[in-house]
Image: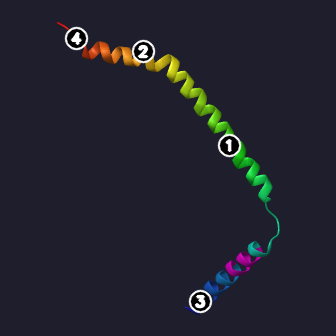
């Protein structure tokens, strides 16, 4: 039982030390790098969405509305 308690104490001390090292570290990305990445992803996403909207607006939606009106305007 004492052996188990000693092992648990050693593990907890190691965890605390590793957390302290992570918090003390000065490495990492800068704010400007992260802001540029976010801005690029927003711009590329907007371009993709606008391209898809133009594709659906001109190609898919007219045929879709035509098919729906033909389906419901059945005169038999």
Residue shown at 56%/27% (left/top)? 52
Crowdedness of circle 4 by 10 Å Cα count: few (<14), some, many (20+)?
few
Choose top left, top right, bottom left or bottom right for residue 45. top right
Q: In front here: 20 or 76?
A: 76
Q: Which percent across, then down, holds residue 65? A: 38, 18
Q: Quadrant of the N terminus?
A: bottom right
Q: Are marks 2 and 4 in contact (CB under 8 Å)?
A: no
Cα separation between marks 1 and 4: 47 Å
First-in-chain label (3 vs 4): 3
Residue shown at 50%/22% (left/top)? 57
Label for residue 61? none
Which element is circle 3 on?
helix
Report the span colored magenta: 15-21
Residue hosting label 4: 74
Q: Are marks 1 and 4 in contact (CB under 8 Å)?
A: no
First-in-chain label (3 vs 1): 3
Cα separation between marks 3 and 4: 81 Å
Label for residue 63? 2
Which marked residue is nearer to the observer: mark 2 or mark 3? 2
Cα separation between marks 2 and 3: 73 Å
Q: Are marks 2 and 1 in contact (CB under 8 Å)?
A: no
Residue shown at 19%/8% (left/top)? 75
Residue hosting label 3: 5
Q: Which percent across, then down, holds residue 16? A: 69, 81
Which element is circle 1 on?
helix
Q: In front here: 12 or 46?
A: 46
First-in-chain label (2 vs 3): 3
């Amino acid at each position: 039982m004492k052996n188990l308690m000693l092992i648990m104490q050693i593990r907890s001390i190691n965890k605390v030390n590793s957390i302290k090292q992570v918090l003390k570290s000065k490495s990492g990305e800068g704010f400007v790098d992260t802001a540029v990445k976010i801005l690029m992803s927003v711009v590329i996403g907007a371009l993709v969405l606008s391209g898809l909207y133009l594709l659906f607006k001109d190609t898919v939606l007219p045929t879709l509305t035509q098919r729906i009106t033909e389906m419901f305007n059945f005169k038999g």
